[in-house]
Image (spheres, grey):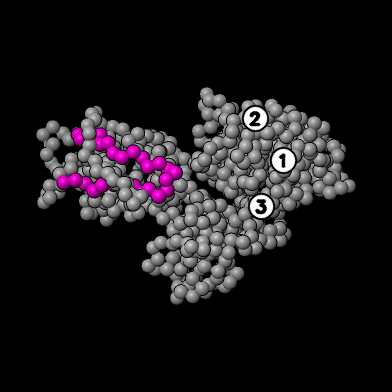
């Protein structure tokens, strides 16, 4: 924690009180401040020890201006649920008006503090100002949504000396909280809350498809209750237009409910207010499914959810084993197949969960080598395949059944060179096929409904550059694009929106594109690798090629990066984390099973993909 803040010209020992008992750590401030120098406190709590909670000390009697600011900044990084200790550093008026939940600003090295010296002769006016400065890394807004940020941070903190008590207190300060990146990583964690896709067809998807909406919650401040409250409050504004919640508007926890804890059978009881008291069983089961999906990766685990009406009556009781009957994750939880192109440029496959290395041609024309291909995509039901010809000019679609023919191309690019033609295609949850035409004269992102018919030009307001890679998420409402501009290749995430009357050609748009890799400037390969996670191959400015996981919101997920692999040209992952990561590298097609090292599948092969 001390490494997160810098400032002040001199250092001296601080009067710090700390104790560890019953899983609680109490800290004094450790920010470096002018006037009073640095205070050295307790080291950061080990992140893996979730039982240890950190609390700050209140201001001491006759604390200097520097100690007040330092103590306040340290209190922002504690595990105090309501920031009660932090408010002790504020004047009564400031404490009432301060809204810490409004935002969290993350700085690279924590806030530095610069004293604004009063004019000569006015040193004893009873007021003092500090400026908090730093390099911005990210912000978390009032909806708990993370967004990368850059630029300088500079905010003033004003202090006054109380005329009666003679104590310094902060009376003017920015809203929200501010902390260093390492403190943020210790204090916060990313968790997915789940809603249902609202722009998918009921005919194509009889089950509602769950869509992940990642948010950040405080790690040791009752995160389970935080997540339920966040879920009830609705989706983040970026995702909101394409998802729905089964909870009636205004649904909240019953008045007086401050904490939710599963019992010893892993059943969680959620008492709701009057807004939810009249829902039917089917809708209640959808509500419980949203809670189960949201809490399934948290500790303690939840296997069963009981929703209660405002009067305490049971609305429904829903078990984890029944969740798939109401709603499904976008990734089908089944082994499926891994597909790739063999040395004859035919589509072949291997059972996704197997350790085998013997690939077999897929049934139908795509596996017979009728057309040599350079890329392939297989629909999520694994009944239809799409392939781009070896020269990149033509897109073919064929059924994966024996004897199926290929027919004429469904799309043809007019690009003059192979590099200026069609990207690899991608299937969405509706059974529609996406591809980009890189023709410099007419670059377009295109959609073919059910892989056939007249291509629909997708509207992409805000897109600046040429699309070089397309991958649609399993939920069908988010899309990942590698976009090239001036030699830089960025990974952008967009929201898919559809409009138009039934029976008419829909208007399809990709809106509010945002970067998922702000620190990488050359993305060479990417694939979805979870409900809100992707795996990418790229390099930082003047850096070496690397493989890593990234979140759709631009944050870095916890856990290690994939094992290093040289010469990676293409990457394939599944949203189903039981399936291994697969790559096309200088060693051919290789895979990375959980807990193992990279293993060679075949020496000659390319373009590996999972369904999607």
- Image spot of residue 556 (x, y percent): 50, 40
Q: Which mark is residue 355?
A: 1
- Image spot of residue 422 (x, y percent): 72, 36
Alpha carbon separation for disc pair 2 and 3 = 27 Å
Could you tell me which residue is drawn at 87 percent across and 45 percent down?
405
Which residue is denoted by mark 2 in the rendering? 568
Alpha carbon separation for disc pair 1 and 2 = 21 Å
Q: Which quadrant does the N terminus fall into?
A: top left
Q: Secondary structure at mark 3?
A: loop
Reading the chain from its start, which is encountered first: label 1 or label 3? 3
- Secondary structure mostly taken by the magenta-highlighted segment of the chain: loop
Q: Establish if 172 lies above or below 240.
A: above
Which of the 4 image quadrants contains residue 516? Answer: top right
The stretch in magenta equals 33-61
Question: Which of the two discs, 1 and 3, sits closer to the camera?
Answer: 1
Q: Is residue 262 rendered to the left or right of residue 344?
A: left
Could you tell me which residue is drawn at 44 percent across and 54 percent down?
223
Reading the chain from its start, which is encountered first: label 1 or label 2? 1
Which residue is denoted by mark 3 in the rendering? 333
């Amino acid at each position: 924690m001390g490494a997160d803040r810098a400032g002040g010209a001199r250092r001296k020992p601080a009067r710090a009180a700390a104790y560890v008992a019953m899983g609680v750590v109490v800290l004094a401030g450790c920010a470096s401040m002018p006037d009073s120098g640095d205070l050295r406190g307790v080291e950061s709590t080990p992140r893996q020890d979730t039982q240890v909670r950190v609390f700050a000390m209140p201001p001491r009697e006759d604390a200097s201006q520097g100690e007040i600011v330092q103590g306040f900044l340290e209190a922002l990084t504690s595990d105090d649920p309501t920031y009660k200790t932090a408010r002790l550093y504020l004047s009564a008026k400031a404490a009432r008006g301060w809204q810490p939940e409004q935002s969290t600003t993350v700085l690279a090295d924590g806030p530095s503090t610069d004293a604004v010296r009063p004019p000569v002769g006015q040193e004893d006016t009873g007021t003092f100002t500090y400026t908090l400065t730093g390099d911005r890394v990210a912000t978390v807004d009032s909806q708990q949504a993370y967004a990368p940020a850059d630029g300088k941070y500079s905010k003033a903190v004003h202090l006054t000396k109380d005329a009666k008590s003679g104590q310094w207190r902060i009376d003017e300060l920015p809203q929200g909280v501010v902390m260093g990146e390492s403190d943020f990583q210790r204090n916060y964690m990313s968790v997915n809350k789940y809603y249902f896709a609202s722009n998918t067809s009921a005919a194509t998807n009889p089950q509602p498809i769950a869509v992940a909406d990642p948010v950040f919650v405080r790690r040791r401040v009752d995160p389970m209750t935080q997540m339920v409250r966040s879920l009830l409050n609705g989706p983040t504004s970026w995702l909101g237009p394409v998802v729905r919640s089964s909870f009636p508007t205004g649904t909240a926890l019953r008045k007086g409910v401050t904490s939710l804890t599963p019992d010893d059978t892993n059943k969680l009881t959620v008492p709701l207010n009057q807004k939810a008291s009249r829902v039917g069983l089917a809708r209640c089961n959808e509500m419980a499914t949203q809670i189960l999906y949201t809490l399934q990766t948290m500790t303690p685990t939840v296997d069963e959810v009981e929703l209660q009406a405002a009067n305490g009556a049971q609305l429904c009781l829903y078990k984890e084993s029944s969740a798939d009957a109401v709603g499904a994750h976008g990734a089908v939880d089944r082994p499926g197949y891994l597909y790739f192109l063999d040395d004859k440029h035919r589509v072949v496959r291997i059972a996704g969960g197997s350790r085998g290395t013997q690939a077999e041609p897929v049934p139908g024309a795509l596996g017979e080598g009728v057309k040599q291909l350079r890329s392939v995509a297989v629909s999520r039901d694994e009944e239809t395949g799409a392939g781009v010809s070896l020269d990149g000019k033509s897109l073919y679609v064929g059924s994966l059944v024996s004897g199926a023919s290929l027919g004429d191309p469904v799309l043809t690019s007019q690009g003059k060179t192979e590099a200026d033609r069609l990207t690899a295609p991608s299937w969405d949850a509706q059974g529609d096929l996406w591809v980009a035409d890189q023709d410099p004269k007419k670059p377009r992102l295109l959609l073919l409904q059910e892989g056939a018919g007249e291509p629909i030009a997708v509207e992409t307001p805000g897109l600046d550059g040429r699309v070089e890679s397309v991958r649609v998420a399993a939920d069908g409402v988010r899309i990942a694009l590698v976009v090239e501009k001036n030699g830089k290749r960025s990974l952008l995430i967009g929201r898919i929106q559809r409009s138009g009357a039934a029976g008419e050609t829909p208007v399809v748009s990709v809106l509010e594109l945002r970067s998922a890799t702000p620190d990488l400037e050359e993305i060479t390969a990417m694939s979805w690798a979870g409900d809100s996670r992707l795996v990418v191959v790229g390099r930082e400015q003047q850096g070496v090629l690397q493989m890593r996981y990234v979140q759709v919101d631009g944050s870095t997920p916890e856990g290690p990066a994939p094992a290093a692999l040289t010469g990676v040209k293409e990457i394939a992952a599944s949203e189903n984390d039981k399936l291994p990561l697969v790559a096309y590298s200088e060693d051919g097609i290789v895979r990375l099973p959980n807990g193992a090292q990279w293993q060679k599948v075949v020496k000659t092969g390319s373009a590996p993909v999972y369904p999607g």
